[in-house]
Image (tube, grey):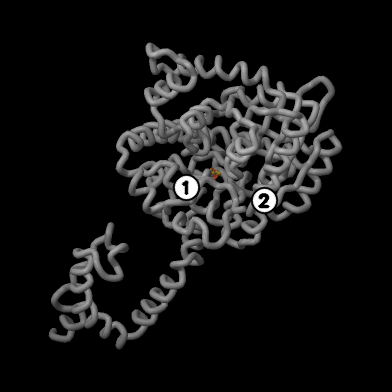
Amino acid sequence: MGRAFVGIQPSFPAAAREALKDSQLRTNLAHATGTIRGKRARVTEELPDWEFLREAARGIKQQTLADLADLLVEFEKNAQAAGAIVHWASSAEEAIAVVREVAERHGVESFVKVKSLTTDEIGLNEAMNAVGVDAYETDLAELIVQIANEHPSHVLVPAIHKNRSQIRDLFIEHLGANEDTVDDPAVLASIARAHLRSRFLDAKMAVSGANFAIADTGSLVVVESEGNGRMCLTLPEVLVSIVGIEKIIPSWEDLEVMMQVLPRSSTGERMNPYTTIWTGTAEHDGPAEVHIVLLDNGRSRTLAEPVGRDALMCIRCSACMNVCPVYERTGGHAYGSVYPGPIGAILTPQLLGPGQAETLPYASTLCGACYDVCPVMIDIPSILVHLRATGPHGGTEKAAFAEVARTLSNARGMRRAHRWARFGLPLARLGSALRIGPIRAWSRSRSLPQVPRESFRDWWNTR
Ligand code: SF4
């Protein structure tokens, strides 16, 4: 069975063309990303050492990737010593099998969920529904996406593509709100709160991800805004946390840096409202049974990539999405992955492996805005260029540029190219206008240059 990412079809160009027809979507996205961009800019500008913090965060993640094997073993040892049961899953299927086994052993027919991209990545909800166990999302935005029967379109704000009145309509249809309900955020939140309260109180089991896993104590950290995550992490008797192996950081000192850069970069807050940290189990406090599933699912292969491995440094803050001109116009669904935007364009093809999501590295203007805001300084544009060069069209591009280099590096070649351009370019322009010929796709959004009647050499020779 393949990995359970949300469908990678249609390819990005086709999906983006469809998304661009939706003017309501573009309005929602422009408003939401613009607001978060402004908040992030304000709280990062007020820190005189912001750039040093970014460098420190990058250093921590780079060192972590270099020592990952040792840190994972250290985390496992410390988490087990604190009472957690640690599982290793090389694939989505293995991770799902752990959740299924735990659910069956405890006889649960449903569980509550903390917002988690990793569980979306492995398609946990769909897989568990297929065996008769319901997954209830408790994050407000995830709940909206779930009742709409859609997928998240942003890593931080999963329902960013929906506005208040669309959410109100969903609540009337699925959560029993009456027709007089107004689309006021406080009213809508109170309806969701009432709906979720009974879910929390009835739940025997919860599933979460984690923002960070601290190796030197075996602790897990969940950073959130609503407190719903904390309810899931403390009320049920059984907790299963599915954690990508790249979420490890060596120590609590490193967490101090991460907790300064993450909330500022994601929600534009100095500090997020709820940070829950737990270490194994404790008598009469929180879940009595804690499972931690350390998930690979393509990460080891990505780690072996000398250039692309930096994508594993991502702390899922979403800042790159909020500044990306492509994301702002197409929205997240066009990427066909739970990781949309610039990070999705470099992470998804690598996690999925060769031959998958090959158009995503082209979903970028290479403007560099993502690199400028990334709190761990991932050079996303360079990785995009690298993935394009090593992708299926990379060979053609390489051959074309080798020919250009050969031509431009000798005078005879240049003269021949000038002659060709005088006859070839008008033909190519005609082909482009008629949408035929080899450059029709390239010229869809670009204009071929006009050819002057006389080349500079000819002009020079006649004078
Ligand atoms: S790549 Fe950087 S900016 Fe984008 S989500 Fe990851 S950490 Fe945030």
**Would you call the spot at circle 1 few (<14 residues within 10 Å), some (14-19), or many (20 or more)?**
many
Q: Position of residue 206 (x, y in %)?
A: 68, 29
Q: Is residue 317 left or right of residue 440?
A: right
Tag 2 residue = 91
Q: Above or below — where is 362 with respect to 401?
A: above
Q: How many marks?
A: 2
- Please name whichever residue, 125 or 402, is drawn nearer the observer in this view of the structure: 125
CB within 8 Å, label 1 to label 2: no
Residue at mark 1: C-beta within 8 A of ligand 1: no
In three-dimensional space, the C-alpha distance between marks 1 and 2, rounded to whole angstroms, equals: 19 Å
Q: Above or below — where is 351 with respect to 237?
A: below
Mark 1 vs mark 2: which is more N-terminal?
2
Residue at mark 2: C-beta within 8 A of ligand 1: no
Q: Position of residue 347 (x, y in %)?
A: 55, 52
Residue sitting at 52 percent across and 53 percent down?
A: 346
Q: Can residue 148 be seen? A: yes
Tag 1 residue = 336
Q: Can residue 52 be seen? A: no
* Secondary element type, mark 2: loop
* Secondary element type, mark 1: loop
- Please name whichever residue, 258 or 234, is drawn nearer the observer in this view of the structure: 234
Q: Inspect the image, locate mark 2, and give the three-letter code of the amino acid beneath it.
A: Ser
Q: Quadrant of residue 168?
A: top left
